[in-house]
């Protein structure tokens, strides 16, 4: 069976740890990480090696946070990539497995968040679609109290990370992947929508609908470019991946102003 040659550079736990420290990541902090594993190069040990390198740099007093979203737990009427036949919608709503923070896999988030979700001692927040997982001494405080009707707003881990003065680390990911910017969308005029998903309740599984803010990443790359011109952003490479490290509260504050001026009605 023919296979393609590996794409370098060769990344190990030690080289990734060195690159992360060179970028400016330090022990003891809280950091929200977005990753593209394939952009790093050939990682010896795969996603778990990336997690170990991050934890090596953060140390025992640091806290690693990743998005562990499961957007497939949603109303099939809104599915577009790909859609499903309308005749299936009632059956999907009736059969969708309820969210369980212990067992529900991530959806479209990549290998590193999935590795963090399964890491010994990891804690995961309660939102059926927009959960975050964390490892470290502040993991429970950051993930606790994630409200069903506040996916990425004031009662989500993003607000707890802002309060903690956390950093954002983009590893091979652009600003369009930066979930922290969605927190700003909750603070500017934005439309609302009915959001539905399957949940576990004391009475068992049920299909649940809430009213929440409609968010999207439209123009986040443009927002991020403006942020980099105005505020400190450490830039470098980790493995082969372009990397950015910056203060989450700075990014959210900048996004509030930028969205109010450039996208006054928030999400679509």
Image (cartoon, rainbow, N blue to C red):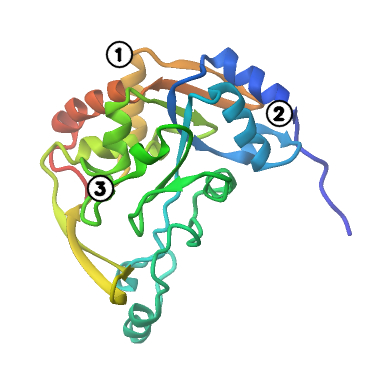
- Above or below: residue 267 compared with residue 19: below
Residue at horizontal 33%, vertical 55%? 127
Assign the N terminus to one quadrant of the image: bottom right
Q: Name the residue under label 1.
A: 230
Rounded to the nearest whole Å, what is the CA distance between mark 1 and mark 2? 33 Å
Q: In this view, does 25 lie to the left or right of 252?
A: right
Rounded to the nearest whole Å, what is the CA distance between mark 2 and mark 3? 36 Å
Q: In which quarter of the image is residue 199?
A: bottom left
Q: In which quarter of the image is residue 194?
A: bottom left
First in sequence, mark 1 or 3: give its number. Answer: 3
Q: Mark 3 points at which residue?
A: 215
In the rendered image, residue 184, in percent from the top left (x then y), is placed at 22, 35
Rounded to the nearest whole Å, what is the CA distance between mark 1 and mark 3? 24 Å
Of residue 105 and residue 201, the one placed in the foreground of this image is: 201
Residue that extends furthest to the left in the rendered view of this protein: 189
* Neighbourhood count class around disc 1 (C-alpha, 10 Å): few under 14, some 14–19, many 20 upward: few
In the rendered image, residue 266, in percent from the top left (x then y), is placed at 18, 42
Of residue 247 and residue 123, the one placed in the foreground of this image is: 123
Q: Is residue 118 left or right of residue 161?
A: right
Residue at horizontal 70%, vertical 33%? 41
Residue at horizontal 34%, vertical 87%? 87
Q: Name the residue under label 2.
A: 13
């Amino acid at each position: 069976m023919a296979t393609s040659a590996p794409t370098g550079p060769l990344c190990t736990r030690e080289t990734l740890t060195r690159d992360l420290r060179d970028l400016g990541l330090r022990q003891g902090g809280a950091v929200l990480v977005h990753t593209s594993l394939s952009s790093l190069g050939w990682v010896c040990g795969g996603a778990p090696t990336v997690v170990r390198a991050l934890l090596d740099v953060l140390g025992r007093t640091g806290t690693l946070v990743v998005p562990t979203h499961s957007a497939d737990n949603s109303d099939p009427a809104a599915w577009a990539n790909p859609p499903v036949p309308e005749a299936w919608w009632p059956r999907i709503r009736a059969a969708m497995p309820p969210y369980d923070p212990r067992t529900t896999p991530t959806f479209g988030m990549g290998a590193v968040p999935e590795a963090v979700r399964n890491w010994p001692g990891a804690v995961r927040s309660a939102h059926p679609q927009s959960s975050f997982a964390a490892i470290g001494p502040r993991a429970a405080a950051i993930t606790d109290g994630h409200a069903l009707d506040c996916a990425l707003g004031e009662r989500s881990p993003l607000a707890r990370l802002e309060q903690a003065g956390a950093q954002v680390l983009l590893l091979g990911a652009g600003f369009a992947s930066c979930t922290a910017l969605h927190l700003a969308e909750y603070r500017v005029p934005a439309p609302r929508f009915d959001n539905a998903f399957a949940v576990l309740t004391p009475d068992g599984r049920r299909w649940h609908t809430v009213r929440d803010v409609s968010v999207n990443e439209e123009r986040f790359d443009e927002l991020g470019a403006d942020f980099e011109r105005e505020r400190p952003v450490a830039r470098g490479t980790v493995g082969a991946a372009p990397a950015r490290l910056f203060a989450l509260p700075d990014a959210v504050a900048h996004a509030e102003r930028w969205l109010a001026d450039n996208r006054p009605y928030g999400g679509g």
